[in-house]
Amino acid sequence: MIMFSCRVFVLLLVCMVNTSIMSQTLFPSLTAETLSGNKITFPQVVKGQKALLVVAFERQAQSQADAWYDAYVKNFQPQGYVFYELPMISGLWKWMSGFIDSGMRSGVPSYKHDNVATYYGPLDTYYEAFGVNNKSIVYVFSLNEQGQITASASGPATGVKINALLQGK
């Protein structure tokens, strides 16, 4: 019985260490331009602040991104978080970025322009880093003041996901 308990304890300890290591992963470097025209690099732009980042790979995910913004205003902003929405677009479309960004500017309220930062470039590295298995949903990351991922979620905002991100799970 004692041997079994020790094995369970060691297994739990290993799980806690793995969770701790995963929660210490630095958000991958990503340079994007906000709709207000500022070039920013993640995670450096959010260092010193807690952040909620919503990453989208397809236009169809916009309603989910909007719902996460609403969740940010209600639940994360009062806790001192900053917010960024990151549309991720293949570098093949870079030549049309002016047209695409102009369309986004006209469809996104101006108060969000500083917080919507579009990335144009290779996507494969980010698919892997973010665990993307469905490009039509959003991927959401909670970052600590050092730019480390403390929790993540994907898909629509729900109470369970919001609470897990706030608790760093």
Image (spheres, rainbow, N blue to C red):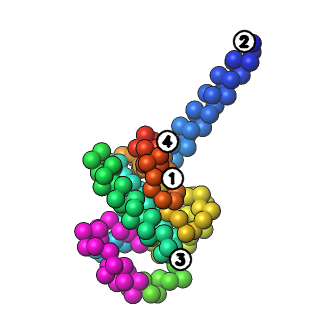
Percent x, y of residue 134:
60, 65
Distance between the alpha carbons at the discs numbered 1 and 3: 23 Å
Would you say residue 23 sits in the magenta stretch? no
What mark, if any, has residue 45 been given in the picture? Answer: none
Residue occupied by mark 4? 169
Residue occupied by mark 3? 90
Q: Are marks 2 and 1 in contact (CB under 8 Å)?
A: no
**Lower sequence index among marks 2 and 1:** 2
Type of amino acid at the residue the image marks with label 2: Ile
- Give the camera-side residue of 137 and 54: 137
Distance between the alpha carbons at the discs numbered 4 and 2: 31 Å
**Lower sequence index among marks 1 and 3:** 3
Question: Is 53 placed above or below 106 here?
Answer: above
Percent x, y of residue 69:
36, 60
Percent x, y of residue 103:
37, 83
| In this picture, residue 68 sits left or right of residue 152 | left
How many other residues sit within 10 Å of disc 2, few (<14), some (14-19) or many (≥20)? few
| In this picture, residue 1 sits left or right of residue 32 | right
Q: Are marks 4 and 3 in contact (CB under 8 Å)?
A: no
Residues in magenta? 98-118
Distance between the alpha carbons at the discs numbered 3 and 2: 56 Å
Residue occupied by mark 1? 153
- Give the camera-side residue of 78 and 91: 78
Type of amino acid at the residue the image marks with label 4: Lys
**Lower sequence index among marks 4 and 3:** 3
Q: Residue furthest left?
A: 111
Question: Is 169 placed above or below 98 here?
Answer: above
**Lower sequence index among marks 4 and 2:** 2
